[in-house]
Amino acid sequence: MDYRSGSQIREDFLRFFEGKGHRRVHSSSLVPHNDPTLLFTNAGMNQFKDVFRGAERRDYVRAVTSQKCVRAGGKHNDLENVGFTRRHHTFFEMLGNFSFGDYFKRDAIAYAWELLTSKEWFGIDKDRLYVTIFEGDAQVPRDDEAEQFWIETGVPKERIIAMSGKDNFWQMGETGPCGPSSEIFYDLGVAASESGEDRPFPEDDQRYVEIWNLVFMQFDRSVTPEGPVLTPLPKPSIDTGMGLERVACVLQGVLSNYETDLFAELVEASKQLVMASAGASSTMDSISGSPLPASYRVIADHARSATFLIADGVLPSNEGRGYVLRKIIRRAIRHGRQRGALGSFFYAMVFPVVKIMGTAYPELVSATESIKKVLQAEEEQFSRTIELDRESLMIWWSSRSLSNLPKYT
Ligand code: SER
């Protein structure tokens, strides 16, 4: 496999599907303005929800996107894991191809396999790939059809594993379009395993990484007093999602998303900015070659989500979306302080974020200055809160006479 940058991978994905008659559609906003069921856009299909249901028509029946997604707050919430795992992010890009009543399972499977394995495209070694299908439940039968199409495409039967609805039935939320899915996994090799044991698929979730989810949209889910009801969609459709950061990890031959070019520079920038803010008081992270603390990954990740959210009009506040944004910003600042930062540093992360992402998302470029100002104001306000907390703690302690202190025996 040739090295491909994150930007090239994004562009190759979009070009591949354009070549298959898909319309390139720009990512929708992270704020789903017409959807009260959703806090943030969390999947590529969100902007097409009504098209799947037949309630909205577009002048195309095939689309391809690179969608900005945030999974922090709401049904899909990854916030607390971020920085401590190889693959969790608050903000990520989802590459997706969509069919609105046009092609269905057979073509979706064939396209995915061609893009991943063809030498002209991603050229991934077939022996490192596994696929899953839905094993069925009381309402929806086992997906024998998908299994058959995978076999016809050339995947050996023993590499196709049936899984339960938890993994292989995708729904956007309590209500909305949904259907059985088929996921494609890549084997990073035993080096990626935490235990170091050589285990078969799917027993090791560090080693076998899900790179693409093909959803066969067939139902609209609603909730009635008698329980959930699945109503067939007017036309079976396709919704797929491939995490750009994950596939970059595979194509760049690294074990963690944070080591890809989409993140490496950001993680380094967060270290430099924190160290500059820490001044001479902190040399603890300056030894090159030592593994970087999770805090820098947290800051890198949160800088992306904060930048993109503010560009889409979210402002820090005490409720709703603004509250989640405030939590993200404050979590990043706290991590900087843990590494010794004394003053503001986080606002300056907007520049490396825009440098890496601005070509694909021009909305960031025009908003850079205003994003910086919002972050700077929030950072200053939070620093004052921390100072006030510290001062009141000091006053509280100095008002106690030593005789009132608890005795430890
Ligand atoms: N909607 C599916 C997902 O988010 C596929 O795009 O995984």
Image: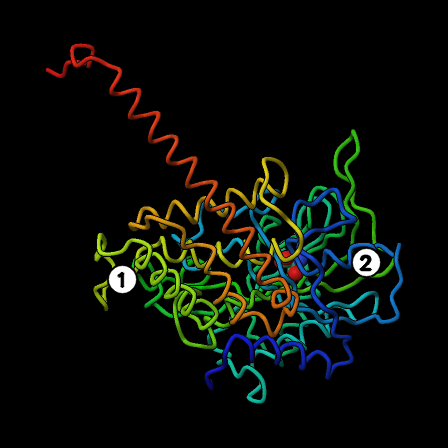
Q: Secondary structure at mark 2?
A: helix
Image position, residue 328 (x, y; %): 50, 47
In the foreground, 7 or 318: 318
Residue pictured at 76% horizontal, 76% vertical? 22
Q: Earlier in the sequence, mark 1 or mark 2?
A: 2
340 on left or right of 263: left
Q: Quadrant of residue 99?
A: bottom right
Q: Which amino acid does the dot numbered 2 rest on?
A: Phe
Question: How is the protein colored in the picture?
Answer: rainbow
Percent across and percent down for residue 267 are 39, 63
Height in image: 266 above or below 334? Answer: below
Q: Secondary structure at mark 1?
A: loop
Q: Nearer the viewer, mark 1 or mark 2?
A: 1
Mark sitting on residue 291: 1
Q: What residue is shown at x 76% (from left), y 52% (from top)?
A: 177
At label 1, counting other C-alpha atoms closer than 10 Å, the crowd grade (few under 14, some 14-19, many 20 or more) is few
Total numbered labels: 2
Tell me which corner region of the image, top left, top right, bottom left or bottom right, holds residue 75: top right
Q: Mark 2 sits on what residue? A: 52
